[in-house]
Image: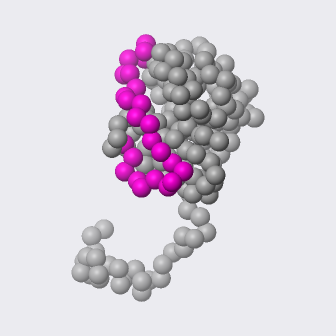
Amino acid sequence: MIIVVNTSTQNTVNNGFIVDCFIQLAQLKPTQQFVFLVQDKNAILHTLPNNCSTYILGKQPKAVLFWAYWYNIKIPRILKKLNATSYINTDAVVSLKTNLPQFLFLNNIEVDNPTKVFTDKVTTYYKKTIEANLLKAKKIIVTSKAAKEKICGTFPSLQPLVCVLSVGANANFVPCTWQHQQEIKNRVTKGNDYF
């Protein structure tokens, strides 16, 4: 199975988080092949496992007018070239011209603004067809319950597609003792409190 993950449109902070998530998944599933679509060769600063590779896609057009070409012609061609079996996009945009299973990984939902769900560019691209386009996704993965509630409140028909991926610390992370904290402070800052 070849899983293609489009990280080319994310900023550096989001890209690092998303790539970290998928690298951990790739380590858990060594029989699956992961291909990251990136803007340039320096986009991923991680050492990738053997079952991961990158494909240089280039920069997404800034003009929303060209997004239809980008998502409906360019991306499907690359997916076909890579023999992809599934496609994960980190934007709120699906490709209408491919029959591959598509998954949306949304970590930038406008939770704070009650009148908006997606960024202005995504909303401009979709216009009035946003719900129909999102229904093409097999699953929509969000990183918080608030984001799920916002999407499901705005688009009730998406309820069965939206799931929450917990990104919090797992059981391996526990608070360190006061003595250990002091040792680290003495070693790193020579005992000075900076905050």
Residue 34 horizontal/vertical position (percent) = 55, 44
Q: Name the residue rendered at 64%, 52% in the picture.
A: 31
Q: Name the residue rendered at 52%, 22% in the picture.
A: 77
**Where's the N terminus, which quadrant?**
top right
Q: Is residue 151 visible?
A: no
Q: Is residue 55 above or below residue 76?
A: below
In this view, the residue in front, 52 or 157, is: 52
Q: Quadrant of residue 104?
A: top right
Q: Is residue 81 visible?
A: yes
Residue 51 part of the magenta-drawn span: yes
Q: Quadrant of residue 72?
A: top right
**Range covered by the magenta-colored residues:** 43-66
**Where's the C terminus, which quadrant?**
bottom left
Residue lying furthest bottom in this view?
A: 179
Residue 134 horizontal/vertical position (percent) = 64, 25
Q: Name the residue rendered at 35%, 79% in the picture.
A: 184
In this view, the residue in front, 104 or 56, is: 56
Name the colour scheme.
Answer: one colour
Is 122 left, or right, of 25 in this rendering?
A: left
